[in-house]
Amino acid sequence: MDRSMTLVLPRTSRRGLLLSGGAAFSAAYLPKIARAGGATDKRLIVIVLRGALDGLSAVAPVGDPDYVRLHGALALSTGGPNPALALDPFFALNPGMPVFARMFRERQAAIVHAVATAYRDRSHFDGQDVLESGFAGPGHTSSGWLNRAIAELPKGDRAALKGGLGVGAVTPLIMRGGAPVVGWAPTGLPQAADDLATRLMDLYRQTDPALATSLAQGLGIEKIAAREMGEARPQGGNEAQLMRRVAEGVARLLAPEDGPRIAALAIDGWDTHANEGGGGGRLAMLLGGLDGAFEAFQQTLGAAWAGTTIVAITEFGRTARINGTVGTDHGTGTVAFLAGGAVKGGRVIADWPGLSDANLWQNRDLRATTDLRAVLKGVLADQFGLSAAALGARVFPDSSGVAPMKGLIV
């Protein structure tokens, strides 16, 4: 069982922000230049929950008569110890997420249940490949759907000009590709001195103006970090506290007028094969960390929150039946969380398949009735105006048969 969690802490120094995607510069990678100025000022943050989230313990179908029978000790209830937070007569939210429940009541958060990618096997490696690449099957690791979405933005869109922000020592696959991306990396990576950056800028202005502009873009993000975060280096804390701190750091980079508009980050640790805990154990703690991240984004983005959409997604779900170690194994259907001032919230969106034995996928999993690509396409269409043709052919290749979900964004 993998209980690790990979988080990039929101700490920065003069060279703590490295460019990613493109030609190499020291330990960093330089992105291609964006040649646009723009108008749209909306923000999109994608959180990848690596390890496969148990959707039935995150958002419980308490109204399904087979739920308790299948999920046993992990089943949530709106009564008793660690009561779940009722969302409607059928669904209840894990008690580790009171902030999300508040956003849900305020119609700034929504859930899509019984959702999955097109992948139907149970390999983390392949599942994450499909989730982040946007292809229907594994083996496509050269670019990610979010980077390709940035490349499809109109030339005048501000998000196209600012490019994307990839959080991590290595840019997540979802954000790799030809569109401009800057990466926020831990300060432990090799870093260039100020005078070296100045000399390279002078050199590139003479020999490669596009590369000079790319370097300037990355240094601009660095200045934002220095201005918004100073030299703060938060230390210690548990996994939940670290999630919140990462969110605060990302929000401080996205909030300013001169900051990027689209970001992606990944959090490991959701592979709960044993001692998952339901409403009061490890999973609730992890969901509490995600909840704190949502709150940190809302508080730190300030006025920009009104035009922000956050999507939290995972590679697949977990089994409907618990296993012998009071955990769950790799499954299929799960949940996607949406939050933000731009979200048309207060809804659990589900074509509920039921949890009777006859309705389970391969007699073990929640059956997926919604293609995750439909959700992501709907967000991109409504948030940034991307066409169904571009989404079906280039952002999510060969998916023209999957229509964008309508009505997710205000």
Image (tube, rainbow, N blue to C red):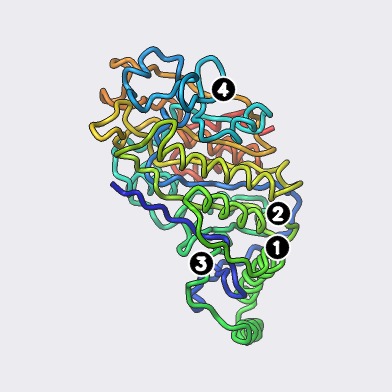
Q: Quadrant of residue 276?
A: top left
Q: Are marks 2 and 1 in contact (CB under 8 Å)?
A: yes
Kindly identify which residue carries mark 1: 228
Picture layout, residue 144 above or below residue 368: below
Name the amino acid type tagged 1: Glu
Name the amino acid type tagged 4: Leu
Of residues 165 and 390, the one nearer the viewer is 165
Q: Earlier in the sequence, mark 4 or mark 3?
A: 4
In space, the residues marked 1 and 3 are separated at their CA atoms by 17 Å
Furthest toward the top, the residue is 65
Q: Quadrant of residue 184?
A: bottom right
Q: Earlier in the sequence, mark 3 or mark 2?
A: 3
Of residues 87 and 121, the one nearer the viewer is 87
Q: Earlier in the sequence, mark 4 or mark 2?
A: 4
Percent x, y of residue 33: 62, 66
In space, the residues marked 4 and 2 are separated at their CA atoms by 30 Å
In space, the residues marked 3 and 2 are separated at their CA atoms by 20 Å
Q: Quadrant of residue 156?
A: bottom right
Picture disc at residue 255:
2
Kindly identify which residue carries mark 3: 186
Q: Earlier in the sequence, mark 2 or mark 1?
A: 1
| Residue depicted at x 66% and y 30% | 344
In space, the residues marked 4 and 1 are separated at their CA atoms by 36 Å
Kindly identify which residue carries mark 4: 87
Pointer 2: residues within 10 angstroms few (<14), some, or many (20+)? Answer: many
| Residue depicted at x 53% and y 78% | 191
Percent x, y of residue 86: 55, 21
| Residue depicted at x 69% and y 70% | 223
Q: Are marks 3 and 2 in contact (CB under 8 Å)?
A: no
Q: Is residue 177 visible?
A: no
